Image: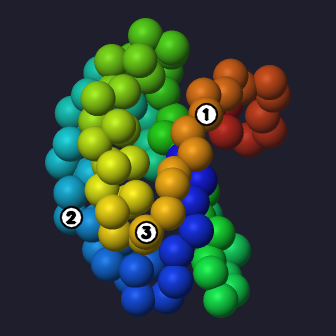
Amino acid sequence: MTFYAVGSDLAALAGSLRSELRPIYEPLPGFRGLLVLEKPGDRSHVIALTLWDDEESLLASEKIADAFADQITHAAGNAVARNIYSVFGSIGIGE
């Protein structure tokens, strides 16, 4: 997911990530982690990446991702873009 948020919105979203997403995602089969990146500014650019063992596990989590994207849209006041990527290559991750 990628979206923009102002400082106060971002603080609330970060708290939501910590409290709500961990217990939802961690028990799911194939879940490997969540990484949230922020490019600070007047409107912070945020990228949230979930990592999965395989496409089947990812697709099983889509309803959760849809609900969280709706929550972000409501809190940040703008749309969330969502994309699915395959790993093309990596160094030092999962080796």
Amino acid type, label 2: Ser
Report the side of 64 relative to 9 (left or right): left
Q: Residues within 10 Å of mark 2 (few under 14, many from 20)?
A: few
* Secondary structure found at label 1: loop
**Residue beneath label 3, please?**
77
Nearer-the-camera pick, 15 or 42:
42
Which badge, 3 or 1, comes first in the chain's sequence?
3
> Do callouts 1 and 2 mark residues in contact (Cβ within 8 Å)?
no
Tag in front: 3 or 1: 3
Query: What percent of the width, then of the height, locates residue 16?
Result: 27, 66
Height in image: 29 above or below 94? above
Height in image: 87 above or below 77? above
- Confirm whether residue 36 shows in the render: no
Nearer-the-camera pick, 66 or 36:
66
Distance CA(mark 1)–CA(mark 2):
24 Å
* Quarter of the image with the C terminus in it: top right
Amino acid type, label 3: Gly
**Residue beneath label 1, please?**
83
Report the side of 28 relative to 76 (left or right): left
Which badge, 3 or 2, comes first in the chain's sequence?
2
Q: Specify the farthest residue to the top.
A: 56
* Secondary structure found at label 3: loop
Report the side of 16 relative to 47 (left or right): left
Residue at position x 41%, y 18% from top? 59
Height in image: 15 above or below 63? below
Height in image: 66 above or below 79? above
Amino acid type, label 1: Asn
* Secondary structure found at label 2: helix
**Residue beneath label 2, please?**
19
Distance CA(mark 3)–CA(mark 1):
20 Å
> Do callouts 3 and 1 mark residues in contact (Cβ within 8 Å)?
no
